[in-house]
Amino acid sequence: MGKYIIAGNWKMNKLPSETYDFVKEVAEATKGAECEVVCCTPYVCLAPAVEAAKGTHVKIGAENLHFEDSGAFTGEVSADMLADLGVDYVIIGHSERRAYNNETDETVNKKIVKALSKGLIPIVCVGESLEEREAGITMDLISIQIKKAFAGVPAEDAVKVVVAYEPIWAIGTGRTATDDQAEEVCCGIRHMLSDLYDEAAAKAVTIQYGGSMNAKNCAGLLAKENIDGGLIGGASLKAPDFATIVAAAK
Ligand code: PGA
């Protein structure tokens, strides 16, 4: 299965002035990690984060990007700008951006294509709301999100994409999906990728679970066959908790 990746999603937390020391702390706490360790930070924290990560195993990611190369897009940040800074990863289509910033399956797709063309690794978020889960349409919805996300992405690029399954009802709520609920959907995503590409490509893709993953519940989730890592919000803001999750990913 895909290589293990534990990525922190700081969201709108931490100051630029705190970033350098915190990334150093994460690097120290996760020394000897057997998985890829990523800190995704707000745009203004990226420069000190990249600086602190230099010479360590920690990789840095952004939380969004714009799908155009450049131009009159006030307030936006391009893939070239991120790559120029030394950023390796970028979260795309987080449910908070879908909810508050008009992110759609179409913009998610454009952003994935752009990120890949600039050598950035997209961490693409998919997931259902509680209403959708209760209506029994989780798999249908995720199948649409996956198909649209990967539209026009050739197999050689698709294997670089990280998919994060994040049930919206589990994000920041303390209500984690059970190990089996998370595995069921991650396994489903692997089948969808197998249908879109082939089994080898589907196996190569890293599929993360995200949504209230923490130091206590990570081991069970990460032990599941189709869960190759985690996208961690709240628990990524404390280096020891984050390090416990990293240690469970092998
Ligand atoms: P959480 O956030 O771990 O705080 O639930 C995860 C995410 O939204 O990526």
Image (cartoon, grey):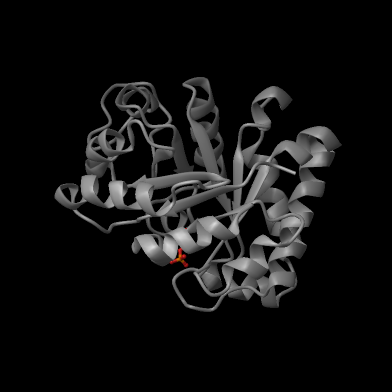
Q: Is residue 118 above or below residue 177?
A: above
Horizontal side of 26 relative to 141 (left or right) equals left
Q: Residue 2 in the image: x percent, y percent?
A: 69, 42
Q: Nearer the viewer, residue 140 or 127?
A: 127
Residue 139 occupies which quadrant of the picture?
Answer: bottom right
Residue toward you, 33 or 42: 33
Front-lying residue, 37 or 27:
27
Does the image show residue 68? Answer: yes
Tell whether 160 sits left or right of 181: left
Residue furthest left as drawn:
17
Residue 188, horizontal then vertical, whole percent: 78, 55
Image coords of residue 212 (percent x, y): 50, 70
Residue 65, located in which quarter of the rendered image? top left
Against 226, is 129 above or below?
A: below
Residue 198 seen: no
Query: In the image, is residue 95 above or below residue 169?
Result: above
Quadrant for the N terminus, please: top right
Q: Nearer the viewer, residue 90 or 54?
A: 54
Count up the numbered dots. 0
Q: At which x and y percent is residue 249?
A: 60, 55
- In the rendered view, tell whether residue 213 sits above or below residue 118: below
Seen at 35% across and 55% down, the residue is 10
Q: Residue sitting at 39 percent across and 47 percent down?
A: 39
Please state if 3 lies on the left or on the right of 49 as rendered: right
